[in-house]
């Protein structure tokens, strides 16, 4: 039994010695190349990230059709499609689009004034963000 303990003790001492040496040296710098765009990036204006998906609902409309709506953060836009396999058609928030066009950051969106939010684009209109919406003039419920 003693013969087995000696190699085990020696191995543990070697492991401790090698671990103790790890923390003593300074890291080695490799390269030391300056970023060629550092000055341009420092002077660049901040970039707004695209909105994230907030919620996704399916709605049954008065004529029996189903519309799939994806709401995005900040209520800036919605994605609409008639079939899950179709690509989304992005409809912009009309109040946000008017604010951007006028450059008036102080304008209030309809949701802030108590009215429903209207999204439109590519010949389509969607009003509302809750369990009941109006899509192209039809009432639709989740």
Image: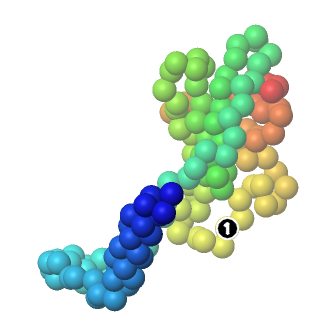
Q: Place residue 53 in its image quadrant.
A: top right
* Residue 61, image x, y percentages: 76, 19
| Type of colouring | rainbow
Residue 21 visible (yes or no): yes
Tell whether 135 sits left or right of 3. right
Q: Residue at x 73, y 47 (%)?
A: 117
Give x and y (percent) for residue 20. 39, 82
Image-based side of 30 in relation to 10, left or right? left
Q: Residue at x 60, y 71 (%)?
A: 105
Answer few, some or many: residues within 10 Å of disc 1's Cα (few below 14, many 20 plus, some between 14 and 19): some
Q: Residue at x 72, y 31 (%)?
A: 57
Q: Name the residue beneath numbered marker 1.
A: 107
Identify the image quadrant of the C terminus. top right
Left/right of residue 38 with respect to residue 114 in the rendered view: left
Q: Position of residue 36 (x, y in %)?
A: 17, 77
Is residue 29 placed above or below 7 in the rendered structure?
Answer: below
Determine the residue located farthest toward the top in the rendered image: 64
């Amino acid at each position: 039994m003693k013969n087995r303990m000696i190699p085990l003790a020696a191995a543990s001492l070697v492991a401790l010695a090698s671990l103790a040496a790890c923390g003593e040296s300074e890291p080695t710098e490799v390269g030391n190349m300056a970023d060629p765009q550092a000055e341009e990036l420092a002077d660049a204006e901040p970039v707004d990230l695209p909105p994230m998906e907030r919620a996704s609902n399916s709605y049954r409309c008065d004529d029996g059709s189903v519309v799939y709506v994806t709401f995005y953060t900040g209520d800036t836009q919605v994605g609409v499609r008639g079939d899950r396999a179709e690509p989304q058609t992005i409809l912009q928030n009309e109040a946000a689009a008017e604010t951007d066009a006028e450059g008036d950051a102080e304008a209030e969106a309809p949701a802030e004034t108590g009215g429903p939010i209207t999204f439109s684009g590519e010949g389509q209109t969607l009003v509302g963000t809750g369990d009941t919406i109006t899509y192209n003039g039809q009432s639709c419920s989740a």
